[in-house]
Each structure stands twice: as C-alpha cells, then as structure tokens.
Image (cartoon, rainbow, N blue to C red):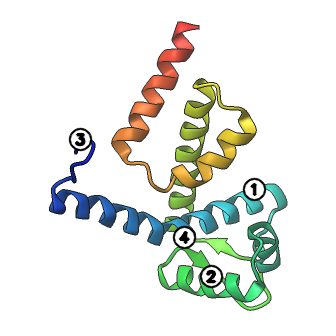
C-alpha cells in the first residue's frame, strides 16, 4: 500500500482499476437475475413491467438488458411472456443472493442498521472479492459465537 503522498506501483494500481471495471460490467446482469429470481419466488413470475418499476427505469431499458442476458445464456424470454432464468441464471442469482446476505449480516454485526445495511450491500456485493467475502462471513460467525 502506498503511504500518504506516494502512489502505488502503476501496474498494481492498474490491476485494481481493472477489477473495478470488470465488476461494473457484471453488476447489471447480477442485479437483474437476482431480481428476476426474487420476483418468481414472490409472485410466481417476473415481467418486464415489474423489473422496470423496481429498477426505476423504462421498459425499453429493461428490454435492452434482457436481450443481453439472453445472449449470455442467463435468461429465457419470449415476447409478451414472463421471464425465466436458465440453469446458469439461477446459479448466478443464488450466488448473488448469498453474497448479499453475507454482506448485510456483516454490516449489521458492525452496528449498521438493517435498512442501511441492505442499501449498502447493493453496491458492495458486486465489488467484494471472494477473500474479503469469506473474511466477512468468518467475522460474522465469530461474533455470533461470542454472544
């Protein structure tokens, strides 16, 4: 780590930014498959109109993202029909949900309110490494054992 007034090694710093750029690319796909899974679980179906309403975007925006998710093999969508997740889409949604829960529990164990932990987890869950996620989980488990 660079000290105050010093910059990190350029290659090292570039790798950090590359990781963030990659996380941003997957963030939308993860948010969509996670919400589709939640809607199917809660309502028995996921529709374009529901996604648009919950993300606060237009149906055209949702259609564009769904087309990309179809190409990536995560979603099955037909005109005027509900959306479905492929096996890969379901696996990604489950992984996202687990990451989200771990981060929420970690933040709450630090004293963050449930409402704020949920909000903050929405951003953190896409950028946290497996190593950090495991540390969050271990910390939370150790706190539970201690109480």
Category of crowding for the residue at label 1, using alpha-carbon neighbours closer than 10 angstroms: few (below 14), some (14–19), many (at least 20): few
Query: Dividing the picture into quarters, in which one does residue 11 lie?
Result: bottom left
Query: Dividing the picture into quarters, in which one does residue 133 lie?
Result: top left
Q: Tell me whether circle 1 and circle 4 mark residues in contact (CB < 8 Å).
A: no
Category of crowding for the residue at label 4, using alpha-carbon neighbours closer than 10 angstroms: few (below 14), some (14–19), many (at least 20): many
- Between residues 41 and 25, which one lies in front from this camera angle? 25
Q: Which residue is mark 3?
A: 3
Q: Secondary structure at mark 2?
A: helix
Figure check: 92 above or below 119: below
Q: Which residue is mark 4?
A: 29
Q: Residue at x 62, y 79 (%)?
A: 76
Image depth: mark 2 or mark 3 in front? 3
Figure check: 128 above or below 17: above
Sequence-earlier tag: 2 or 3: 3
> Marks 1 and 2, Cα distance to the nearest angstrom?
19 Å
Q: Which residue is mark 2?
A: 66
Point out the image quarter for the N terminus: top left
Q: Tell me whether circle 2 and circle 3 mark residues in contact (CB < 8 Å).
A: no
Q: Position of residue 38 (x, y in %)?
A: 72, 57
Image depth: mark 3 or mark 1 in front? 3
- Between residues 82 and 48, which one lies in front from this camera angle? 48
């Amino acid at each position: 780590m660079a000290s105050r007034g010093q910059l990190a090694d350029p290659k090292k710093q570039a790798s950090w930014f590359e990781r963030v750029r990659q996380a941003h690319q997957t963030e939308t796909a993860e948010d969509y498959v996670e919400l589709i899974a939640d809607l199917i679980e809660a309502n028995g179906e996921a529709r374009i109109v529901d996604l648009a309403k919950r993300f606060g975007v237009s149906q055209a925006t949702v259609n564009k993202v769904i087309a990309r998710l179809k190409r990536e093999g995560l979603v099955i969508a037909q005109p005027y029909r509900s959306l479905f997740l492929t096996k890969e889409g379901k696996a990604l949604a489950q992984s996202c949900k687990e990451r989200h829960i771990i981060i929420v529990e970690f933040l709450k164990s630090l004293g963050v309110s449930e409402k704020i932990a949920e909000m903050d987890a929405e951003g953190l869950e896409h950028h946290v490494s497996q190593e950090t996620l495991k540390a969050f989980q271990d910390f939370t488990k150790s706190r539970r054992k201690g109480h």
